[in-house]
Image (cartoon, rainbow, N blue to C red):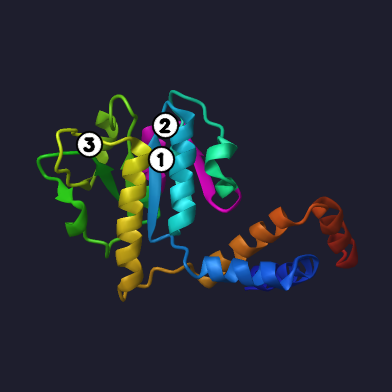
Amino acid sequence: MKENIAKREYLAYLEEFITENRKEKFLKVLEQRTNHFTIAIEDVFQLHNTSAVMRSCEVFGIQNLHVVEEKYGKSIDKEIAMGAQKWVDVNRYGSNLECVRALKEKGYQIIATTPHENDCLLDDFDISKPSAIFFGTERDGLSEEIMKEADGFLKIPMAGFTESLNISVSAAIIIQNIMSRLRKSDLDWKLSDEEMISRRLDWTKNSIKDIKRIEQRYKEINNLV
């Protein structure tokens, strides 16, 4: 409780250094954000695909992206991400199982995006359960580790000769579909008050150029140093 009050007081102080339009934009965007769904990508080799998936998360309202870096290191391609790295939380993991366990502990079911004998077509996917949707590498798809840990399998219906889509395209199609359906549902999908405050704090900090000096000044005023 005390921590929440302290965060709100700190936020109110920092918001004095940004415009009213900026504050209103943050609130408007956060009203459309969710942690009901989250996206995970496994060792994607081509950097621009990681960045493009992040951009889709940001555009359609998914707040958290999880990146497994077991084989390939990652950095964000800023040109493709188009600033999305400022507004989406990126969680990094050293192994598939570390990522899966962390997400399961948070209450997510693991959904593998891949054709499977028990797969579900996108329009038939049950959106009621909090889900972590995994996307695999461009070359090999999802690993056996992820497939064994999966609680369900999801695929995009296709009517042509080509049997697969680029990961960034697949992610955009799936994210847009499930988020559109989620917003039309009666589910409690929005961020909690605590999550909203935390995101507003982070975003406000990212918007202030001289943030270190301002933070130091706040600590001095409130005897926090």
The stretch drawn in magenta includes residue 90: yes
* C-beta proximity under 8 Å, tags 2 and 1: yes
Q: Position of residue 185 (x, y in %)?
A: 30, 73
| Residue on which disc 2 sits | 95
Q: Position of residue 195 (x, y in %)?
A: 54, 64
Horizontally, residue 176 falls left or right of residue 117, namely right
**What's the mark number on residue 99?**
1
Is the residue marked by circle 3 packed among few (<14), some (14-19), or many (20+) residues within 10 Å?
few
Residue under the image location 54 percent in, 50 percent down: 89
Horizontally, residue 122 falls left or right of residue 206, namely left
Residue type for callout 3:
Lys
Is the residue marked by circle 1 packed among few (<14), some (14-19), or many (20+) residues within 10 Å?
many
* C-beta proximity under 8 Å, tags 3 and 2: no
Label 2 element class: loop
Work out how far the residue at label 2 is from the one at label 1, CA to CA, in angstroms: 6 Å
Q: Earlier in the sequence, mark 3 or mark 2?
A: 2
**Residue stretch rendered in magenta on the structure:** 86-102
